[in-house]
Image (cartoon, rainbow, N blue to C red):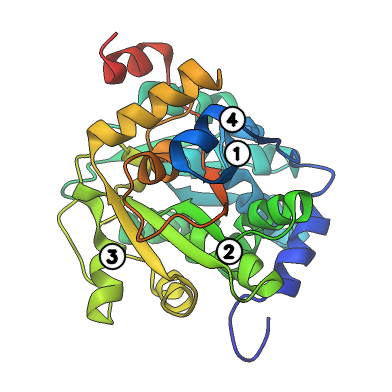
Amino acid sequence: MTDTSPVALNDVRDAAARIKDVAHRTPVLRSRTLDAMVGAEVFVKCENFQRIGAFKFRGAYNAASRLSREQLRKGIAAYSSGNHAQAVALAARELGTTAVILMPEDTPRSKVDATVGYGAEVVTYDRYTGDRVAIGEALAAERGLALIPPYEHPHVIAGQGTAALELIEEVGDLDALVVPVGGGGLIAGSGTAAKGLAPTIRVIGVEPEDGDDTKRSLEAGHRVRIPVSRTIADGQAADIPGELTFSINQRLVDEIALVSDDEIRDAMRFFHERMKIVVEPSGATALAALLARRTESIPRRIGIVISGGNISAQRFAEILGA
C-alpha cells in the first residue's frame, strides 16, 4: 500500500487483475425512462449479477487469495449480515479451504441457506445485544482462523473498488458516482478508484434514514455510534463506520444522502417493473436517492452501483406489498 493512503488506485488495479478469472465483470445497464425521470444519463453497475449476488465477492476473494498456504489450511472466519458471509464462504471454497461465519440470528433465511450451501459453518448471535467484532475475533482466535472482516481491511476495500473501476473503464468519464453505504468499504474502494481516475468526480454515498451513522460521523469529524437500525435495508444496518473506511471516506466522499424505506421500495419497484431486475433493499438505495431527489444536485452523467440482489421471492413480495 502507499504511504499516503492505506488503499490507492494501483491497489484496486492489482485487485482487478487478481479477481479477473474468478469474479464476474458485471453488466452496466441503461434505461431511457430512468434518464428522463432523473434528468441525466444514468449508468447502472449491476453487482446483483456478481457471484453470490453482491459486490462482496470482489473484496472477499482479493483478501482470501493473499493468505499463506498454511493459513488456508487452517481456514477462514468472517462476520456478516449476509452478503459478505456468502462471499467469504465461496472464496474459501474456490481456494480449497473452509470458512466459519458469524451471522445475526435474524439474518434472512435465504442468506443463511446460501452461506451454508457454499460449504461454510454458520454460528449465530443477537445483533441487538452482541458485539459481532468481539465475538468474531474470539471465534477466529479460538480456532486459529484468519479473520476477513466485511470492510475493515485494505485488501477487502481494494477489491470492492474494482466495481467502480470496471464501470468507469466501460462508460468513460462520469460527473458523479452514487454508492450505497453500510460499513463504508464499497464507497471507500469506489471513491479510491473513481477519484484516482478522475479527481473532479463527485462521490455520493447513500444511507437509510434510520442508519445514518456515516453521515453523522462525517458531519461531526469523528466516528459516531447510533442504535442498530431496523430499516428494510438490512445490509446497511451498521451502527458505526469502520475506523479504516471512515479515514478514507473523510477524504473522498463529497456527500451523503439519506433515503426512507418507502423511497427504497419505490426504487426496488422501478428496477423490477422497468428494468426487469431484482434488487435487494440495500442495493436499491443509490437509485432511491436519485428518484427522490435526495442529492444536492443532478449532474449530467451519473454512475450508480447496485450493491446486491440477494432477497427471497417471499421477502421481495412482502416489502413491495404484493
Name the residue that disc number 4 marks.
Answer: 32
Q: Which mark is residue 215?
A: 3
Residue shown at the point (63%, 65%) measured from the top left: 194
Tell me the distance, in whole angstroms, between the alpha carbons under discs 1 and 3: 24 Å
- The quadrant of the rendering that contains the C terminus is top left
Kindly identify the amino acid type of the residue bearing the numbered disc 3: Lys
Residue shown at the point (37%, 18%) measured from the top left: 316
Name the residue that disc number 1 marks.
Answer: 47
Instruction: Please identify the residue farthest to the bottom as the structure is shown.
Output: 3
- Closer to the camera: disc 1 or disc 4? 4
In this view, the residue in front, 223 or 272, is 272
Q: Secondary structure at mark 2?
A: helix
Picture coordinates of residue 300, whole percent (x, y): 56, 54
Kindly identify the amino acid type of the residue bearing the numbered disc 2: Gly
Q: Secondary structure at mark 3?
A: helix
- Residue 208 shows up from this direction: yes
In this view, the residue in front, 141 or 7, is 7
Kindly identify the amino acid type of the residue bearing the numbered disc 4: Arg
User: Mark 3 and mark 1 in contact (Cβ < 8 Å)?
Assistant: no
Kindly identify the amino acid type of the residue bearing the numbered disc 1: Glu
- Closer to the camera: disc 2 or disc 3? 3
In this view, the residue in front, 29 or 135, is 29
Q: Which mark is residue 189?
A: 2
Q: Of label 1 and label 4, which has the lower sequence position?
A: 4
Picture coordinates of residue 206, whole percent (x, y): 37, 53
Residue shown at the point (38%, 66%) measured from the top left: 255
